[in-house]
Image: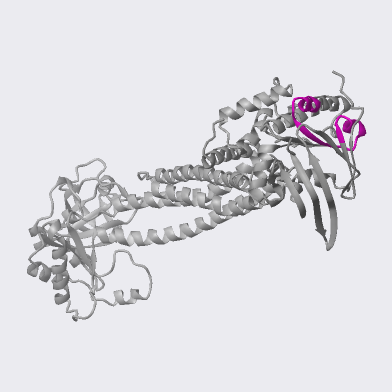
């Protein structure tokens, strides 16, 4: 009679017996599965959602043009804390700083200046805005720095800035509101009661973070400073490097010059911030890192609870089947056979629950992605971790009940009613 | 012919709350191949303990137990499991089948622990089931079978590993008389086919099927006699 390898046979038969036993106790097994599934679901769901959010946010945080960074007084994203006061006390970045930097910096392809504020008082004839629009003061490089392209009309020229011309470029959403039936180019709109001639319309960018990126108006920076600035106004300076290779070097030069211009003592830290696409993404990654950690902790607790559930079920299962264990021992099952059988059952339960959880989690995460209208991501690595954790739970929490089953006395078990 | 089973001065003492219970108190017994033995005795006489001892479910506190020359009293759990698996077939009063498994599957289980391949197992299990007349009911679960049929499945399970000895503990205790007769018929047939059978019972007319009757009393063998007018099940 052919014999097969003991281990392989034991595992194969234990697996089969595990499935039989699970099928024979459907409700109990489903409830246990549910515990594990919810635990894994919470991990995978949160991770999928975060992954999805990250990928969409990162694409939306990609706001600056190629090889472009910005110098400004405060960080792009501020977290309230002890450092906040220090930032507020910094000197504003003034137009003269920009002029000096532009004059002295040798590496940048171009240096431009920008500031913005909210403004609602914008009208054309009887058309008015209902919502505050973003009003920016820019120079001829402004559009390029923010990767914005003209759909119609012309860009600002050096002369527009130099001669304080009252001209404006509109975002498409704003143009739609003010000029539903007319060509805006050449028309005169009022901003805070003063006239501006529309010289251009930009291309549509769509939404970021659920907000329109096309609801803005731009005017020359010189006009902006004259009419919209106050003593708190601190400008932003956009710098574009010649190439990716020169990006770091350019940044170093700009930082050095800004320190000189703003007279920062050698041992003190910068009194301004460098903001780039990378920096924005890093800051956001800091946020999601925190969320991940929290979600991870919650999931660990959920999985722990699920594990205790498995252990409980397995203990009940052992008590329920004391007689069966006795019979199996009487007909030749060794301790190891019984141990393997019950352990396989626990592992199978947790694995199956894990698979269900992974599927639900990925589906749930992607549903969130669908609702946020961002591309979906499948976190394969987390699916893998989830399954690994499930095996661990199956073994970890299954071992004690299995051990108890294996060590039952066959005579006592057979007598058990 | 060598002894199949040899018990020498077997003692089994339990410590129950500080008091020593002498379930077996010096039992000497030799069983030869193809014997048909019944063990009788009142409750608490030690017949279950003796049965468990012979069945290698229990080990003696003192004494020497040899099974086909192997020293059972010195074996560890795994060796005991192995000898139960290879050499002993159990038939219980309450059948003790796996309730959710088919008859075939139930008979297959001992062969799983014997590491047999699936095809071999099914083949052997089928032969065993046919030998107890259950070829028609192989794929039925215990709750779809009558008491007598269930016990026949249990006998098939006991037989399937070609054991040296079949231990039947009150095999007819839970059956109506007609099914009981059927079961005894099968056991008689197995004995005439060369099997060694030990039967625990407290029914005289069941015990009379055996060639030899052992009476236990207070953990000791009081009577060990050949049955003279052996009862035969009319065929």
Q: Is residue B160 left or right of residue A148?
A: right
Residue A211 spot, x, y in % from top left: 34, 51
The answer to whether residue B213 is magenta is no
Q: Farthest top residue?
A: B235
Dividing the picture into quadrants, the one containing residue A76 is bottom left
**Percent x, y for residue B115?**
58, 37
| Residue B196 is covered by the magenta coloring | yes
Residue A414, by quadrant, is top right
On screen, residue A287 versus residue A1, left or right, reads: left
Q: Position of residue A348 (x, y in %)?
A: 55, 43
Please tell me in which quadrant of the rendered image residue A182 appears. top left
| Residue B139 seen from this side | no
- Residue at 55% x, 46% y is A347
Residue B81 vs residue A13, the one in the foreground:
B81
Residue lying at 23% horizontally and 67% vertically, measured from the top left: A72
Of residues B164 and B228, the one drawn nearer to the viewer in this rendering: B228
Q: Is residue B132 left or right of residue B226?
A: left
Tell me if A76 is positioned left or right of B135 in this view: left
Residue drawn 29% across and 67% down? A75
- Residue A371 showing in the rendered view: yes
Picture quarter with the N terminus of chain B: top right
Magenta range is B186-212
């Amino acid at each position: 009679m052919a014999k097969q390898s003991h281990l392989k046979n034991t595992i194969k038969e234990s697996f089969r017996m595990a499935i039989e036993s699970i099928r024979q106790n459907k409700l109990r097994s489903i409830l246990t599965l549910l515990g594990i599934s919810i635990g894994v679901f919470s991990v995978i769901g949160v991770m999928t959602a975060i992954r999805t959010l990250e990928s969409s946010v990162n694409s939306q945080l990609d706001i600056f043009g190629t090889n472009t960074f910005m110098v400004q007084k405060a960080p792009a994203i501020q977290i309230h804390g002890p450092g906040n006061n220090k930032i507020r006390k910094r000197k504003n970045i003034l137009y003269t700083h920009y002029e000096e930097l532009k004059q002295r910096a040798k590496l940048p392809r171009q240096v431009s200046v920008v500031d913005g504020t909210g403004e609602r008082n914008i009208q054309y004839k009887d058309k008015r805005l209902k919502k505050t629009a973003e009003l920016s003061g820019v120079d001829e490089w402004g559009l390029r720095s923010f990767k914005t392209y003209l759909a119609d009309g012309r860009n600002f020229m050096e002369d527009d800035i130099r001669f304080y011309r009252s001209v404006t470029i509109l975002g498409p959403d704003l143009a739609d509101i003010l000029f539903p039936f007319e060509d805006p180019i050449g028309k005169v709109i009022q901003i805070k009661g003063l006239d501006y001639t529309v010289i251009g319309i930009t291309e549509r960018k769509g939404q970021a973070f659920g907000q329109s990126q096309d609801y803005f108006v731009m005017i020359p920076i010189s006009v902006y400073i004259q009419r919209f600035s106050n003593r708190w106004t601190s400008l932003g300076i956009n710098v574009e490097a010649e190439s990716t290779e020169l990006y770091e070097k350019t940044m170093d030069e700009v930082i050095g010059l800004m320190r000189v211009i703003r007279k920062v003592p050698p041992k003190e830290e910068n009194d301004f911030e460098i903001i780039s696409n990378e920096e924005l993404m890093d800051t956001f990654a800091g946020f999601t890192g925190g969320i991940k950690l929290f979600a991870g902790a919650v999931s660990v607790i959920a999985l722990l609870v699920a594990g205790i559930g498995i252990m409980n079920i397995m203990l009940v299962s052992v008590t329920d089947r004391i007689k069966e264990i006795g019979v199996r021992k009487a007909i030749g099952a060794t301790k190891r056979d019984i141990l393997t059988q019950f352990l396989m059952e626990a592992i199978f339960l947790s694995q199956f629950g894990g698979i269900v959880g992974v599927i639900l989690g990925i589906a749930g995460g992607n549903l969130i992605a669908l609702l946020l209208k961002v591309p979906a991501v499948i976190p394969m690595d987390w699916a893998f971790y989830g399954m690994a954790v499930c095996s661990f739970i199956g073994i970890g929490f299954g071992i004690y009940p299995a051990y108890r089953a294996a060590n039952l006395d066959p005579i006592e078990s057979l007598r058990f009613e | 012919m060598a002894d199949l089973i040899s018990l020498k001065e077997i003692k089994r003492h339990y410590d129950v709350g500080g008091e020593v219970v002498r379930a077996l108190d010096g039992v000497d017994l030799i069983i030869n191949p193809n014997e048909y033995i019944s063990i009788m005795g009142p409750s608490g006489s030690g017949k279950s303990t003796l049965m468990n001892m012979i069945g290698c479910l229990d080990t003696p506190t003192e004494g020497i137990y040899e099974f086909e020359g192997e020293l059972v009293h010195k074996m560890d759990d795994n060796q005991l499991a192995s000898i139960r698996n290879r050499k002993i077939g159990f038939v219980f009063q309450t059948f003790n089948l796996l309730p959710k498994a088919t008859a075939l599957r139930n008979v297959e289980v001992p062969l799983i622990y014997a590491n047999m391949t699936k095809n071999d197992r099914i083949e052997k299990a089928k032969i065993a089931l046919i030998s107890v007349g259950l070829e028609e009911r192989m794929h039925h679960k215990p709750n779809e079978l009558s008491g007598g049929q269930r016990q026949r499945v249990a006998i098939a399970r006991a037989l399937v590993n070609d054991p040296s000895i079949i231990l039947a503990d009150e095999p007819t205790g839970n059956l109506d008389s007609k099914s009981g007769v059927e079961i005894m018929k099968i056991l008689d047939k197995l004995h005439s086919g060369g099997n060694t059978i030990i039967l625990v019972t407290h029914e005289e007319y069941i015990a009379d099927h055996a060639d030899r009757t052992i009476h236990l009393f207070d953990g000791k063998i009081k009577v060990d006699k050949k049955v003279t007018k052996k009862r035969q099940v009319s065929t």
